[in-house]
Image: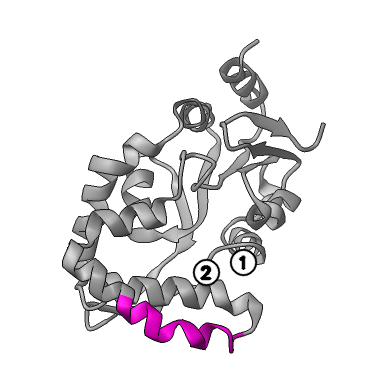
Amino acid sequence: MNKADQITAAAAGKARRLVLFDFDGTLTKGDSFPAFLWFATPFSSMISGVFQLLFQLPQFFLLPAEKRAERAKAVVLSAFIGGKNRTTLLGLGRQFYQQRLQKMLRTELLETLRNYRDAGDMVVLVSASIDIWLQPFCDAERIALICTELAYEQEVFKGTFSTPNCNREEKARRIRDAYNLNQYSAVVAYGNSSGDAAMFELAQEAWYCSNDGNLKNLRS
């Protein structure tokens, strides 16, 4: 019995499962964050953004370790796409999905996601990446999204988030806030790094995706 048949058989006669997918390195062959920056930023703006980052680098060493990743992500985004309005950024996110992101997806993992969705399970993308390019993917695949979201001041992005960086414990917290885990027959999780460990802890079935796309069952 292949994976698709196993998914369909497991769903038959049961309440639907909650199936959680990490994005970068799990559903994709690379990291969408730098790929988006290269796609969305003209060369001249890229150079000026790098200089902005060099001036702000020392401040990171003053932050607690658990805050550095979130702050770094915000500063990088501010340097390269700060000052753009919501409409422009949403448009760039859609273009990035259509022209670049689809080519980064792992075909077999995407098919697995679709098999769960088509079997009637609740499929959720849970990612530290940003909503402007993840939402078009989720809309196209008809799945739910939990991720890091940009904040806007008078419809302009100025380098802050409306949610905490969705990684590690924050992933698990956001999942528990959004879904009553007891309502599902099982929780299934797919991830590829220590950033998914807290999400794995919520799951009865946990799958680790290696760099070559192979899956390892962490509960076997």
Badge 2 is on which residue? 165
Q: Which residue is mark 1?
A: 170
Specify the quadrant of the image occupied by residue 85: bottom left
Task: Tell me which segment is drawn in magenta.
Answer: 51-63
Q: Is residue 90 left or right of residue 32?
A: left
Name the kind of residue labelled 1 in the image.
Glu
Which tag, 1 or 2, sits closer to the chain's start? 2
Q: Locate residue 139, reporting x and y percent.
A: 33, 45
Residue 53 locus on image (x, y percent): 37, 78
**Image location (x, y in percent) of residue 67:** 59, 78
Looking at the magenta stretch, what is its main secondary structure? helix
Seen in the image, is 37 located left or right of residue 4?
A: left
Q: Residues within 10 Å of mark 1 (few under 14, many from 20)?
A: many
Q: Residue at x 19, y 62 (%)?
A: 43
> Residue 212, percent across and down?
57, 31
Q: Amino acid at mark 2?
A: Asn
User: Which residue is nearer to you in this view: 127 or 154?
Assistant: 127
